[in-house]
Amino acid sequence: MGVLSHWGLGGESRFTKDIDLVVFSGFGDEGQFIDPLLKAFSARYPDADTFARSNRIVLLSSREGVGIDLSLGGLPFEKSMLSRAKRIEVLTGVEVRTATAEDIIVMKSIAARPIDVKDIEGILATQGSSLDFDYIRHWLADLAELWIETDLLGIFEQTVQSVREKMKRM
């Protein structure tokens, strides 16, 4: 199980039901990533190969039944996110690379589900002024061209304002 606690989610950890990974595949020969993954893991979706190629996400399951959502990155934002990833020790001697708080905010702004907005609020509340707001706004503006049906910057700015108002009342 994954846990969202490293960047602070309002003071409480939230266990997730899957593991989210990104591999930078670029655009083109995604099969070099998809095919070995589907051989090594159980697929969680019928016709997983076609789904993965059209949606750029491979939905897998570990032997223990944990969902693995492996995104095939190709956008400049995804390349930036991977280059900025921070190493954290999850167990003694075991390190993983995790996205920065800013990159998590960008990804959660894209998803924009209520739970994602709540996660953004928690990160904003705990990370506050240490966040690079210009970086976040840059990528949300850039990605807004791809997600035209979602007001990425608007969602972020509303969430920032909401957190500021809550913090003033404390």
Image (tube, rainbow, N blue to C red):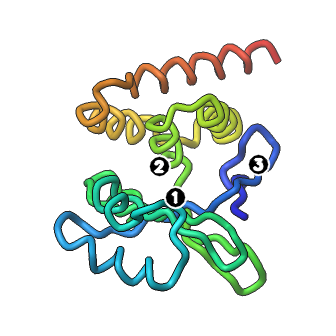
User: Which of pointers 3 and 1 lies earlier in the amino acid sequence?
Assistant: 3
Q: Amino acid at mark 1?
A: Ala
| In-front residue for pair 88/19 | 19
Q: Quadrant of the N terminus?
A: bottom right
Q: Is residue 165 left or right of residue 103?
A: right
Residue designated by label 3: 14
Query: How crowded is the residue under tag 2: few (<14 C-alpha within 10 Å), some, or many (20+)?
Result: many
Q: Is residue 112 above or below residue 95?
A: above
In the image, 27: left or right of 35? left
Q: Which mark is residue 99?
A: 1
Residue type, mark 3 in image: Arg
Q: Residue at x 69, y 70 (%)?
A: 65
Report if the CB atoms under discs 2 and 1 are less than 8 Å apart. yes
State whether residue 24 appears in this view: yes
Name the residue beneath numbered marker 2. 103
61 vs 123, nearest the viewer = 61
In the rendered image, residue 88, in percent from the top left (x then y), is placed at 64, 70
